[in-house]
Image (cartoon, rainbow, N blue to C red):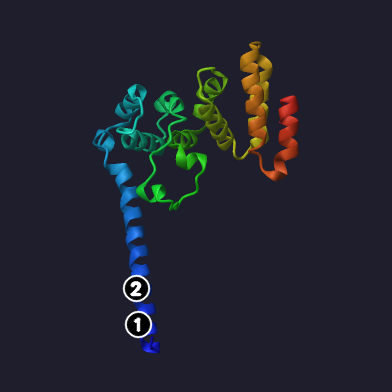
Amino acid sequence: MKEGDVMRAIIVTAVLVTMQIACSCQALGQEDKGADTTCERSKNAVSPDLAQYLNGVVPDAKNADCVTSAIRKLGKERYGPAITALVKLLDFRRPLTQQEKMGFWVRPRITEEMFPAAEALELIGKEAIPELLSAIKADSTSGTARENGVAVWMEIYKYEHPRGVADLKREETKVNDNAVKQRLMWAVQKAVTRCNPDEKAECQRAAATGAS
């Protein structure tokens, strides 16, 4: 192949790759936008209606986009009356986008990104703590929901992680039910793993004594 033909082939290949990347980025943008607008149920609904919807819904493949949209809207509005419904959905995983199904991830696969109720509760903040505690203690809570509950708890305490650990430890010392105590002991140790490196010693003391 002549040098000129080689250069033309390289240029054509580069153009095709650039067009493919551009199309993928455009699709990603359209997909993100659609997640908030495609669900007619929540498109123009007010917060009380969205909370009522989440209270009664059983997430499945058909309504997952609607559930995700409603959760995100309530989180952005920091709608406190939806806390109970959101806590019940702590193990609801949002649907994957088409790009994610193909293996292309543009966002980190962290708790708040994959589980929309976790992010919504973090946005609502300390008002959610009593319901989070109830979920952590409850036998009916799934393992995923309990782990996400601890993650949300510590994110709410993000500027005072040792206090978050200490508050969980104090709750553990209050209970007499052995099963509940075991779940809280697990939560305390899980919470310690979410402390920053420079807080580890203080968090470990909080886990042992309940003092921060």
Residue 174, percent across and down?
66, 15
Residue 52 versus residue 21 in the image, above or below: above
Depth-wise, is mark 1 or mark 2 nearer the camera?
Answer: 1
Q: Nearer the viewer, residue 21 or 112?
A: 21
Residue 101, percent across and down?
39, 47
Residue labelled with disc 1: 8
With 211 as the anchor, is 125 left or right in this view?
Answer: left
Residue drawn 40% across the image and 51% down it: 102
Of callouts 1 and 2, the N-terminal one? 1
In the rendered view of the protein, which quadrant contains the C terminus?
top right
| Amino acid type at mark 1 | Arg
Q: Residues within 10 Å of mark 2 (few under 14, many from 20)?
A: few
Residue 57, percent across and down?
33, 25
Q: Give the image quarter of residue 45.
A: top left
Residue labelled with disc 2: 15
In the rendered view of the protein, which quadrant contains the N terminus?
bottom left
